[in-house]
C-alpha cells in the first residue's frame, strides 16, 4: 500500500482481487486526515478512479475541507477501470445493441459482494451516514444503473457526461425510436420511485457534435434532459431532487469533470451550518 498526503487529505492506493471480474482491481481511497467521528462519514464510490489521479482529486477535496469545512467528511473510493471497460461498465443484464456491457452484472456483484465489504472491514465502519455513487461517461451510466436498481443502498448519484444514449438497437435502424430504445430511460420508466434518491447530472455543450434529431441540441444534452423528464414523470422534483449543471465550454474530458466535481460535492455533501 502507498500513502500520500495533500494537507488535510490522505490518499491510499491498494488492490483488490475480484472473483467476479477475474482480475485485480486498483482502488484509491481518499479520506480526511482528521476525523473525530466515523458515524458522520459518508461513502462515495467513483467509477473510472484513474481519472481522479489526472484531476488531482486530493487538491479538490482539500480545498473543500479547508475552506471553512464546506463539505461533510467523505471516504471516496476511486475504482480504476480495466481494459475491458466497455464490457464491465453499462447496464446490468441489458447489453447494448453491440453486446457491450455484458459483464455489467458481474461488476455490480463486485461492488456489493467484494468492494463494499472490503471497505467496511478495512476502515472498521459498520455503516455510513450516506452512500453515493458517481462516474464519468460510461462510468456515469453504470453508477446511475447501480443506484437506480439498489435504492436501499444509496441516497445520491452523480453522472458526468453520462452515456445515456446506451441503446438496444442501432440509431440508424429504421425501427429506432428514442422513446423505446434508450435502455436507461426505459429502466427509469419501468422502475420504482424511491423518494430519498437525489440525482446530479453534468453536461458540456462541447461534449460531442452529434445531433441525431437535428433539433440544434447535441445528443448528450438531449439524452440527459430526456432522462430528467423520465425522473420527473416517476415523481422526482426537478427543484429539490435533481441538479442539472450544463457547462457552455464543457468538453468530454477530465479537466471539465474536474471543474464540475466541486459543484457535485457541495450539492451532495455541503456541511450544514
Image: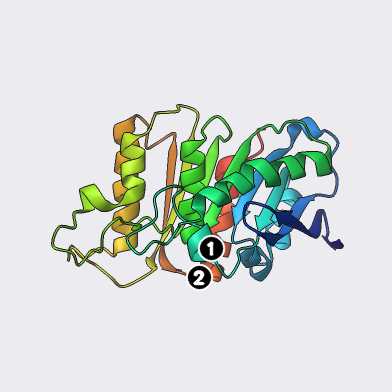
Image height of 210 relative to 22, above or below: below
Residue 271 horizontal side relative to residue 32, left or right: left
In x, y percent, where is residue 248?
39, 65
Total marks placed: 2
Residue 211 horizontal side relative to residue 255, left or right: left
Q: Residue at x 47, y 37 (%)?
A: 149
In x, y percent, where is residue 61?
70, 54
Q: Quadrant of residue 125?
A: top right
Q: Is residue 62 visible?
A: no
Q: Which residue is mark 2?
A: 253
Q: Secondary structure at mark 1?
A: helix
In this rendered view, identify the residue nearer to me: 23 or 267: 23
Residue 26 horizontal side relative to residue 192, left or right: right
In this rendered view, identify the residue nearer to me: 218 or 1: 1
Q: Which residue is mark 1?
A: 257
Image height of 179 relative to 139, above or below: above
Q: Residue at x 73, y 60 (%)?
A: 58
In x, y percent, where is residue 7?
83, 58
Q: Secondary structure at mark 2?
A: loop
Amino acid at each position: 500500500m502507498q500513502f500520500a498526503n495533500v494537507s488535510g487529505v490522505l490518499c491510499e492506493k491498494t488492490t483488490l482481487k475480484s472473483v467476479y471480474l477475474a482480475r485485480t482491481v486498483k482502488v484509491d481511497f481518499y479520506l480526511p486526515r482528521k476525523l473525530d467521528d466515523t458515524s458522520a462519514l459518508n461513502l462515495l464510490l467513483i467509477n473510472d478512479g484513474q481519472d481522479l489521479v489526472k484531476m488531482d482529486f486530493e487538491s479538490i477535496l482539500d480545498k473543500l475541507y479547508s475552506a471553512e469545512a464546506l463539505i461533510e467528511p467523505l471516504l471516496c473510493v476511486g475504482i480504476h477501470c480495466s481494459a475491458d471497460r466497455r464490457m464491465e461498465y453499462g447496464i446490468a443484464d441489458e447489453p447494448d445493441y453491440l453486446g457491450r456491457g455484458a459483464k455489467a452484472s458481474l461488476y455490480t456483484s463486485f461492488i456489493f459482494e467484494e468492494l463494499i465489504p472490503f471497505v467496511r472491514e478495512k476502515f472498521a465502519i459498520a455503516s455510513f451516514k450516506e452512500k453515493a455513487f458517481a462516474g464519468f461517461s460510461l462510468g456515469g451510466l453504470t453508477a446511475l444503473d447501480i443506484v437506480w436498481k439498489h435504492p436501499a443502498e444509496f441516497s445520491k448519484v452523480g453522472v458526468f457526461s453520462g452515456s445515456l444514449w446506451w441503446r438496444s438497437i442501432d440509431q440508424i435502424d429504421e425501427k429506432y425510436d428514442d422513446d423505446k430504445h434508450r435502455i436507461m430511460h426505459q429502466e427509469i420508466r419501468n422502475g420504482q420511485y424511491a423518494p430519498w434518491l437525489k440525482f446530479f447530472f453534468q453536461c458540456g455543450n462541447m461534449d460531442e457534435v452529434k445531433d441525431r434529431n437535428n433539433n440544434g441540441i447535441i445528443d448528450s444534452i438531449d439524452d440527459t434532459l430526456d432522462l430528467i423528464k423520465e425522473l420527473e414523470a416517476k415523481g422526482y422534483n426537478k427543484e429539490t431532487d435533481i441538479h442539472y449543471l450544463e457547462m457552455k465550454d464543457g468538453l468530454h474530458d477530465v479537466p471539465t469533470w474536474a471543474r464540475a466535481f466541486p459543484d457535485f460535492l457541495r450539492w451532495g455533501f455541503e456541511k450544514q451550518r
